[in-house]
Image (cartoon, helix red, strand yellow):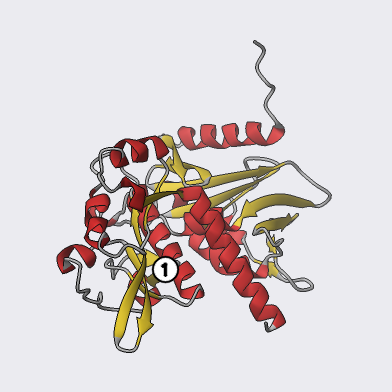
Amino acid sequence: MPTRPLTSSEELVIRFLEKAKSYQSDFELIKILRSRTYRIVRANVLIRASSEGNRRYFFGLNYLCAEEMANVDNPYIAFICGDVDRTVIIPAKVFFRYLPQISHDRNGEYKINIDKDLNIVLQGRGNRLDCSSYINNWEQLINPTPQPISDFSSVEQSLHSIIQGRLLEIGNARGFETFCPDKSKLFNERQLKEIATIDKCPELQFSQYDLLRQIDVLWFKKKGNHYIPQYAFEVELSTGVWSGVGRMSTLLDYENVPLYIISNDHRLYQKVISTNDNSSRYHFIDNNDLGDLYAAEKSLKELRYKIGL
């Protein structure tokens, strides 16, 4: 069966990786939720490529991909502008801060333009992000700022925090009181404790507190001085033991509280839940579906603010 010929953008990505290898740098394809990203040395790099346009280079980038990149360790985005020797290698956290100044549609698809001088075009006449220090920024990519290995989070750990942060923000947008036990973990450069509206997990009459306060995300309704549980979520990304199922069992006496497992492995979910006597109480949400819900909630919030309704 004949293979499909490579597009010009795909060829540029291959040349970029070949150049990375020429620096005696190993690379590995990794999956960060929606994006296909490469680990080069100790950097996580999302690669975008564009052939030459009419004095500009055009790239599409979904908000969710940009956010996911900005929340992993040592992240970069490489914009290849027609040639590997014309590549803007920008720290993803820097780029993410400028994202609100880049035009996008209501689906969260950002239209990134890079001009002939390799500066990113921002909203407003003549407004540019000066990328001169990021052009062919191989040195910073291959030799990043020293950081102890112990300080690095795995991609899986980073994604766990991303999903927790998104669940907290969805709950907040819907008017719930939200709790998360992982106080110091970061989402969009904010600690999760800053996003959650409750610092200390409420105690419930029919729940074992030591299990309750370890559940990844909880949504409550406040009634007087009491908190009534509404939703519980556990993020299960590993292929090992799913301990979250057991933790959420402490809420089984609250019959109106749905228990959600967030995962990218529906087959494993079915295997785990099939052995549980209370399987009907649990519900599966795919990582990508949660991302779509989060993007929709975020877009709706922005639209409500814009029209004042």
Residue 292 appears in the rendering: yes
Quarter of the figure with the C terminus: bottom right
Asked if 202 appears above or below 129 in the picture, the reply is: below
Image check: 42 left or right of 82? left
Residue in the foreground of this view, choosing between 55 and 276: 276
Could you tell me residue 82's position as x and y percent?
Answer: 71, 42
The x and y percentages for residue 188 are 45, 67
Disc 1: which residue: 168
Q: Is residue 211 above or below residue 76?
A: below
Q: Is residue 308 above or below residue 41?
A: below
For residue 124, side relative to residue 178 (left or right): right
Residue 138 in view in this figure: no
Q: Nearer the viewer, residue 276 or 125?
A: 276
In the picture, measured across the screen, residue 64 lies left or right of residue 80, that is: left
Q: Residues within 10 Å of mark 1 (few under 14, many from 20)?
A: many
Q: Position of residue 293 (x, y in %)?
A: 54, 59
Quadrant that contains the N terminus: top right
What is the three-letter code of the residue carrying label 1? Leu
Tell me the element at label 1: helix
Residue at (35% x, 48% y) in the render: 280
Furthest-bottom residue in view? 224
